[in-house]
Amino acid sequence: MEVSPATARYFEELLTGLASAMELAAAARARGLDPTTGVEIPIASDLADRVEALLGYTGIAARIRELEQEMSREEAALRIGDDFVARKFGETTPEEILDHAIRAAMALLTEGVVAAPTEGIAKVSLGKNDDGTDYLKIYYAGPIRSAGGTAQALSVLVGDYVRQALGIGRYIPRPEEVERYIEEIRQYNSIMSLQYLPSEKELRMIIENCPVCIDGEPTEREEVSGYRNLERVETNTVRGGMALVVAEGLALKAPKVLKNVRKMKMEGWDWIEELISGGASAKSDDDDPGAAIKPKDKYIRDLIGGRPVFSYPMRKGGFRLRLGRSRNTGFAAAGLNPATMHILGDFLAVGTQMKIERPGKAAGIVPVDSIQGPTVKLRSGEVLRVDDAAEARRIAGQVAEILDTGEVLISFGEFMENNHPLMPPCYCEEWWRLEGGTRRPENELEAIEFALEGVPLHPEYTYLWDDVAPADIALLADRVSAEGRVGDGGLAVPNTPEVKAILEELLVPHHLSGDQIVVPEYLVLLACLGLTLQLEKRPAWQDAPLENSLDLVMHLSGFMVRSRAGTRVGGRMGRPGKSKPREMRPPPHSLFPIGDEGGSRRSFQAACASKPRSNTDGGIIEVEVGERRCPACGTFTYKNLCECGTHTVPVLRCPKCGQEIGKDQCPRCNVPTVCLQKITINVKNEYAAALENVGVRDSAVTLLKGVKGLISRERPVEPIEKGILRALQNLYVFKDGTVRYDMIDLPLTHFRPDEISVPIERLRELGYTHDIYGRELTESSQVLELRHQDILVSEDCGEWLVRVAKFVDDLLVKVYGLEPFYRAEKPLDLVGHLLMGLAPHTSAGVLARLIGFSKAPVGYGHPFFHAAKRRNCFAGDTEITVSDGRQWISMPIRRFVVENFDVSKPGLDHMGTFYSDPMQPFYVRSIDTQGVTSLKKVTSVSVHRAPAHLIQFATRRGKVLTVTPDHAMLVWDTGYLRKIRALEVKIGDRVPAEEGGLVISDEVVARETVQALDDRVYCLTVAENHTLVANGIFCGQCDGDEDCVMLLLDGLINFSRAYLPETRGGTMDAPLVLTTRIDPAEVDKECLNVDVCDHYPLEVYEGCLAYAHPKDLDKYVDRVERRLGTPAQVEGFFFTHPTSDISAGPLESTYTKLGTMLEKLEAELDLAEKIRAVDTDDVAERVLNTHFIRDLQGNLNAFSKQKVRCTKCNAKYRRMPIAGKCTRCGGNVIPTVHEGSVKKYLEMSRDICKTYAVSEYTKQRVEVLCMQIESTFGEPPERQLGLADFM
Amino acid sequence: MLANGEIVRRFLELKHQVHPDVVSYIREQNDPSLIDRIAAGVPDDTLVISAEHIPGLKKVRDGTRFLVDPELEVILGGAGTTGSVTGHEDAVHYFRDRYNNLSSMIRGRMTAMPIEALAKSPHRYRDEECTIIGMVADTRTTARGHRLVELEDPTGTIRVLFNKGRDDSFAEAERILPDEVLGVKGKLSNDGGLLFADQLSRPDIPINHAPFRSDRPGKAVLISDVHVGSNTFLEEAWNRFADWLQDSDAAYLLIAGDLVDGIGIYPGQENELTIKNIYEQYDVFAEMLRDLPSRIRIVAAPGNHDVVRMAEPQPAIPPEFTEKFPENCTLVENPCLLNLQGVRVLMYHGRSFDDMIGLIPGASYERPGEIMDEMLKRRLLASPYGMRTPIAAMKTDRLVIDPLPEILLTGHVHICGVTRYRGVLGVNSGTWQSQTSFQKQMNIYPTPARAFVVDLQTLQPEVMDFS
């Protein structure tokens, strides 16, 4: 990577900081208090390293670097297969070669940060054709989604390439198998909504011709109904990974496949050409480029109660497109004037996501005060535009109607990224200047003067003529001419509804004075209306063209007038932002098991006091922990450090014969070994000893929370001391031993010292010596260019980091006996220190430097930094889809829908499919998605190999698989979960899991492979929201922009793979590797579409008017992509629109401030009433249909199918045990779905039906539901009469 | 303990073939001497020894039935008899009720001990044959392919292993459904944690059951799944059916649910409705009933498309929708037990088909009769709780099949099927709706526009096709 000297220095500094932290961490780990004695986060500086670290195939990094010199990455991904075939990396069996080659290619194609290569491919195996030949089967799992269509499709190609090299036959499908694919893919589409559902003909063509058998792990709960129990298809359950690869991969990305087929001269893929020419392939149903832009209501198809719609698709009064990029937009963030954010009820705070009509699907909202704000009508009848946030706050209470929601700033790069044709932006100053404007006119006269010179009328003086019909313009002219008069205050016209309405539509500022409408600035208006100053109609009226409003106005005035309406963009509120420490539930301070004795709070204090029998000492508890042995004195213990001071090693035993076996599999019993012992410990003594070790008085810690049990493979125990020190700082540990803070990501390329609360002197020390114009940094208002691994965190996060720093210092001093490192007292002290950023569902952390704090609760970072963590690698074409919770609704069925979805239901979004809204925890039960909690993510899989590493996955469902170096296990799980297998081993072991009342089988196969320490774990997880949340994901702008940061030293010292749960998905979200240097060429391609110019040339605007495709205008816009490979790729960026404060506007969304759904809904509907571009009745109906009715129906249904759980041990039962109590502990068993949760939206729904014009059909659905609910629970009891009723 | 093969072989030696019912009866009795006794009493020309040849086991027919109404009586499930869920304790009563009812059917044939006894003193029962009766809490296949079932009774739970090597009991073990009640004979493992099953019994229909037949002439017409309001409702076929009824001698018309297509039953249903107003759907249906001869007694139950709650038992369709229904129509709940001239008809819409078809190996929508057999063997209309069939867990379990009907009428799957199991006639009557887009997607081909006519004196069904 070629860099300028300044950037080189910057990297140097980062690496120096990292090196010193590593050294300290290594010293601490060497003490032996942790599960292993070394730092467990390997450092990777480039893609090749990441791939090697992720997959663990030794030597592959060097080879990748060689190949990348010569060919494109896609070719390299195929070509690397030759090396595997030649067995250069130690593979032995054909399956293994195939497996490794496919994974390596996938890792390469996905930049080595996504889980797809590890968890997205469950396994690879060989099947037998009817003619006796072998064929290749690739089992895709849910996380394959994270790879994006191109990588998915190419993985099939890689499989075929290697298969041919190995002389394995092609797949010859049986007719019933083809039918099965067709049925199953359709069914998957109905569950999760594919981006593109191929036609039956296309599917047939793909399946019959594809030389590789695309198989998959079951990912859904649903089973196919026809073509079941096929001999060669292992499951009747729907295989989501398979469906994705066939539909979104091969079908949608056929052209990409063809390109590579040609390049590599592969045989047997001729059909691809036919597929492309034959069907409606490779085009999603989005707009065809060139075709007229039509309103698209996709973004409001899945309305959620409480999240308002701001503007209907392309409706008058909606957001007007302004083309440009501010220093905090681009990369899936869009700018609004802070006044707009206030006027829209404060629902949009900094960082709140807005679902938009186009060009993408969603955008993070940031304040940009150099664009226009909304135009509102006050109660007094006055119409004015508000550009100032303070003014907006002041008048917010007086707003009667929001006539126009203002401008939205979207960059050219977004159109590029989303492959969306350009469209006319509203006429604006910068465009005007390109057309000959020189300086902003000072007043109306000057504006008219300029216009008469042939320059178009200045945008500031241009009204929204094209919104008004020519006949209305004529009417207005007549009225003004007949009844108006010009006075001191301006032009006065009698207040009649027609005139007022037209003026409002034109957005002409005016106010009322008595029964007169007064327009203070009227000269331009008169000119455009074709009136003289004496209010007489000009002669131009005689031959006025009455077809087109703009033409009419131009004819009347003689000016060139452009459209200030431009293109309207619809929008509604998406997920609110989030900024808070990561907490598990319940949140522990320490990964120390205390069993049931800790009570529901898992409290050490309670465990210390618990007495198994009344006359015994308290604090004796029985726990399951890992068994370890001291290599020096041979003592068996559970601690990481033997009393003799030696680090202990885990002992693996066969659970059947009890023999100690140093491997993952007992050779005799053929079962996986475990590291487990059930022992009695005196937790009271242990706790007291720990307190003494760190010199803390018992009273200083009021509550120390541990965990109930350990679910990792080796079950290592954290020293209690760590928990005590965390408790002192009020920090909660995450499952991998680190503490983290979650924040939504926003892009930022430049900042001002005064908005990040850091003194200039400190910034100069950090290398920020000059502003973007090359001037010495002296003023705190100068604009500086952000270094691409520097980040801003929220102020709250800053405070939190100080606590973490104190914890780490305490740890170093009191536990490890080293010198403190941070010595931080206030957030400012941490500026310049290093952090680690990690995106959800990824396994690679990114090194970052803290340089300041933002008032808004968001994490601002360079687009490259965010892109480096992104999981969707190919920007343009890749999508990460997250599903929304909809499914949930359908799953347990309705719930999912309701919940996750909050909104929509399947079918809607494609990409996203399901929405979950994080904010609605109630639905969480289903899984993830929704709520923040969400359970359901499909996460991904990882394959790791490393000596002595454990990989653990946790499944949501509570299954755990661990893989150690010697083990190779696959765990896979998909959307909903399910199988675990070991790769190389034969498949076949299944562990059925019970879920949701169904028995789902998990399969586990563990195997070891070849080289000594190869392990892989595959996991699919359904994780939290993310996956499901997919919406955001589309287009690479994933919703999942919520990232977490951790203090570097905390990660280096406290992280251990050994803590990670054995279940699938366990490695997700864990920093398995640390990227130290971001190379823009190796991160998510989306960031290449960030434009970095300071203005767009006129050609761009002209292209917009012609609805040109952004690719055709590529050469006019300076984007990162055009700078790749040069030092300029990371510096010298500019922006087109300045903004004065990146934290302006509301800092917290009304949505999160309001407590109940009722309040939110009221606020939403109130706002809808006010906005001209929103149809309130339609909003009400949509909310009913996509949220409330689904919720009611889902919950009612769930009530009649519900599980029960024990209040004491939390055991879950598919139904009430006959005994009426918990059969395990005898505790009380209660239902999981309550009457209250079924009815929660009932009243609100009925009220909506009464108040709004909702269709009869919808009304009846609510009525019917209401009856059904009554029939289930009985009539509601008479309201209790209170005393007041009698008085 | 005799194995099935052994019993069959012994009979073959005696030159007889034997009906599986007899084999299982002998196994249950565990009395090898029965074989000789049975063989001794069989007439020489008998090809297959069936249940009636078992000495002392004569078909028992209920000869008299006391009828409040000699024509039509609703024994269980009359409108308004189901209530609402009063609290979560109801669920305890619900499953206990199911257990008590079903276990007492098995208890007549085998003496069982409480599960707690096994769990508490395993050494006492080691190597001894034990018998337990429990409700299935969980069932799964082990890694080696055996079937592992967790059984519970009010005293405790135990895991029961069905060895895949024992073909006789294993085939049945694969068909074990969650929440059915089983009797299991077997041996306890050494540590007492597992029972190795030898033999499995279900409540079943007594081997000597003989159905009641009406002593007077009378015919009942059985239909279901009319789906009025759907754009796939076959109006012309219905009209032909109505015309035919005018001239027929049928006295009863039973409709087992899904009278109308309903609203909001599945996403996007709005686009497939010709009548989007739920009230109008019932009005049109009422009109259709009014056009039928008024001498026919009509009984209509709800299904999952109807306006009542989904959870079973479903209440009868409420009066606000049925104002226009003719006088001769009786509204009942789902399920309900009717008495037509003494012949009992159990009418159940059949939501549980969805669950059972998924769970029972080899089951298919095309053969609903097989599923009805399975219902009768388990004496349960809907076995698994918590799957697709919503169940309102109330104090009693109305889904238990008790008393035994002569006819079991179901619908829901839209495919005709007839079965006869130990004397009970099972009829699934198809639909009046052509293939829907959903069914097309699911690859289901319905058999619409058919009605079954059952002669109450002979219990012989006849199918009439109006398509």
Image (cartoon, coloured by chain):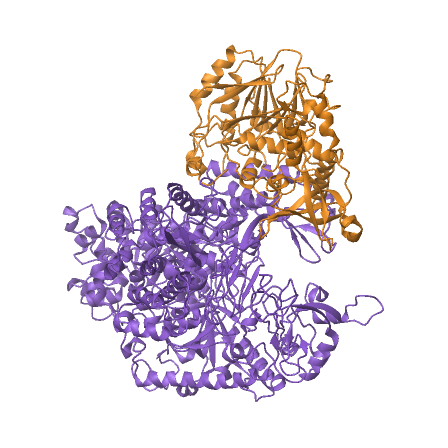
**Image: A329 above or below B105:** below
Q: Nearer the viewer, residue A285 or A957?
A: A957
Q: What colour do you see for chain A?
A: purple
Residue A138: percent from the left, percent from the top? 40, 56
Residue A296: percent from the left, percent from the top? 34, 49
State the orange chain: B
So how many labels did they put on this image? Answer: 0
Residue at (58, 12) in percent of width and height: B295
Residue A1198: name its quadrant: top right
The answer to whether A93 appears left or right of A973 in the picture is: left
Quarter of the image that includes the C terminus of chain B: top left
**Image: A798 above or below A1244:** below
Q: Nearer the viewer, residue B75 or A791?
A: B75
Residue A1272: percent from the left, percent from the top? 63, 39
Quarter of the image that includes the N terminus of chain B: top right
Most extreme residue toward the front is B13
Viewer can see residue A380: no
The answer to whether A161 appears left or right of A31 in the picture is: left
Residue A1090: percent from the left, percent from the top? 31, 68
Q: Nearer the viewer, residue A446 or B155?
A: B155
